[in-house]
Amino acid sequence: MKSNKLSLKNIHHVYGQERQAGTEAIRHIDLEVRDGELLAIVGASGCGKSTLLNIMCGMIEPTGGEVKIDGERISSGSHRIGYISQTDTLLPWRKIDSNVALGLELEGISKRERLERARQMMALSGLKGFEKMYPHELSGGMRKRAVIIRALIQNPDIIFMDEPFGPLDVFTREALQKEILKMWGERKNTIVYITHDIAEAITLADRIVLLSRRPSVIKNEYIVDLERPRVIEECKYNPKFLQLEKQIWNDIKDELCDADME
Ligand code: ADP
Ligand code: MG
């Protein structure tokens, strides 16, 4: 049976080796992500989180080591990958429904079917009534919601998210976190979620990996022992939540560069 287990072995990455002084972003990482696991990766800014994610999803070829999904090289194309970055935007000249349906269009699905599927997905995530609007007519949170369902509509086996809610206010973030938990609860895709927000990592993840400062190695790993389904408003006051938050803060402190502390 097909599995969406992801495995990284001996990953090492140096940028710009052709010039003499390369930037060593990743020193050495071994990591396994279980099928259906929601894994969060946290670390200080500049430590190599985006680099690692881009290696995991096959966008960057690492200078050392290998990434496999279900035992096959990531480049084999046998798994559907979804990717959402912090700066992901909608195409401004397209209505929201045809933005959401973009991936289906690239797959060659008929216009009628893809717009119907977009309409269904939009209704499920609170965007009913906005199908025929343009991106600039929606709030930042609604646009982000549309970006998320644009990735989900293709039903990816593994979804990679790189600080997807970075620039949004805390209320919108919480609403979108709920959306992620609901979607994952139903589909159980494998998710790798990068964030610099420790509370967000605890709220969402089964397990959290803390990266050291650059060149990164895995500094620590934490199992998030909180019941599912999680009620975001409540779980953040759970003593286990608070204790884990404190522990991770303590561990990350040593990894912040002087510049981050100013
Ligand atoms: P994070 O996502 O944790 O903030 P990044 O993975 O973006 O960190 O960057 C890790 C390090 O690699 C940083 O020092 C950054 O300047 C460097 N870096 C990132 N992308 C490139 C690139 N394309 N070329 C050269 N250096 C890069
Ligand atoms: Mg980054």
Image (spheres, helix red, strand yellow):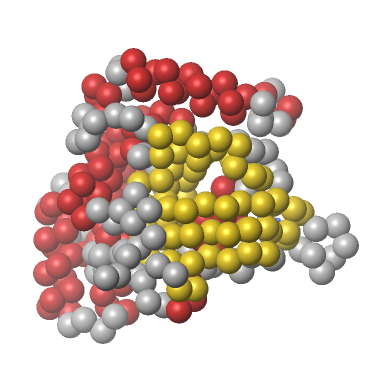
The quadrant in which residue 214 appears is: top right
Apparent side of residue 202 relative to residue 129 in the rendered image (left or right): right
Instruction: Point out the residue furthest to the right here.
Output: 20
Apparent side of residue 46 relative to residue 153 in the rendered image (left or right): right
Of 241 and 199, nearer the camera is 241
Q: Quadrant of the C terminus?
A: top right
Q: Can you say whether 238 is above or below 155 in the image?
A: above
Q: Quadrant of the N terminus?
A: bottom left
| Total numbered labels | 0
Residue drawn where x is 44% and y is 60% of the image: 6
Of 177 and 138, nearer the camera is 177
Residue drawn where x is 35% and y is 20% of the image: 240
Of 53 and 98, nearer the camera is 53
Residue drawn where x is 62% and y is 48% of the image: 48
Residue 104, given in percent of the width and then of the height, sits at 26, 74
State whether residue 45 appears in this view: no
Residue 154, given in percent of the width and then of the height, sits at 26, 68
Residue drawn where x is 22% and y is 35% of the image: 228
State whether residue 110 appears in this view: yes
Q: Can you say whether 126 is above or below 198 in the image?
A: below
Residue 84, given in percent of the width and then of the height, sits at 41, 56
Residue 107, given in percent of the width and then of the height, sits at 29, 80
Apparent side of residue 14 relative to residue 251 in the rendered image (left or right): right
The quadrant in which residue 182 appears is: top left
